[in-house]
Amino acid sequence: MNKNSKIILGIDPGTMVMGFGIIQVCSENVSLVEMDVLRLNARLDAYTKLQLIHKKVHELIQIHRATQFAIEAPFFGKNVQSMLKLGRAQGVAIAAAMQAGVPVTEYSPRKIKQAITGNGNSDKLQVLKMLQRILSFDDHPKYLDATDALAVAVCHHFQGNSVLDPSSKKLSGWKDFLSKNPQRVK
């Protein structure tokens, strides 16, 4: 891997289907490495599911040598039990990244959609179509959790820095942003 290259693992947490998307950023080029889902059997107990989530995230980090980890933050719903389960799944995924020494960043669903489509209220198909344009792929995955996770990784790339990454530098304004990101100017 190139010294200036980074591998970003994006996760869309879930206790039935966990999406993951991996991109490689080399200079100004962003390419899709892999996107898929981990499907978990409904008959498994909660702790076995958490163990499988941890194992899968750990494997992805090791296989692809991820240098950054981004995850979608759970949104607040009315069902408390669902929120608890989702929070546990997210926590286990984060723990796997932290155990591997990979910097972790969390993004709200609205922030992710806004970064990808420019609209925080976009639907999953709009996000998919924009990701296809950004990363030049034609696949239409069976589970949109995979593209949701890919959107997390791309959002993280667009954000340009992690609050947990000591090597990241803050921007001083729009001029600074545009000078450091000429590829974002249309």
Image (cartoon, rainbow, N blue to C red):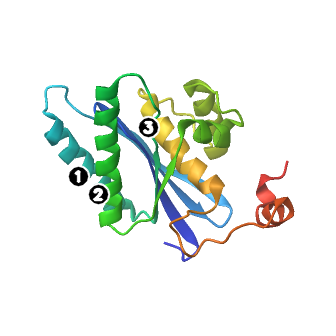
- Quarter of the image for residue 18 reads top left
**Residue at screen point 58% across, 61% down:** 25
> From mark 3 to mark 1, how far is it between C-alphas?
21 Å
Which is more foreground, mark 3 or mark 2?
A: 3
Residue under numbered circle 1: 55
165 vs 92: above or below: below
The three-letter code of the residue at mark 1 reads Lys
- Quarter of the image for residue 111 reads top right
The secondary structure type at the circle numbered 3 is: loop
The three-letter code of the residue at mark 3 reads Pro
> From mark 2 to mark 1, how far is it between C-alphas?
5 Å
82 vs 30: above or below: above
Residue 133 in sight in this render: no
* 43 relative position to 88: left or right: left
The three-letter code of the residue at mark 2 reads His
Give the mark, 3 or 2, whose residue is nearer the N terminus.
Answer: 2
**Residue at screen point 47% across, 33% down:** 75
Other-residue count near label 3 (Cα within 10 Å), few / some / many at <14 / 14–19 / ≥20: some
Residue under numbered circle 3: 74
Residue under numbered circle 2: 58
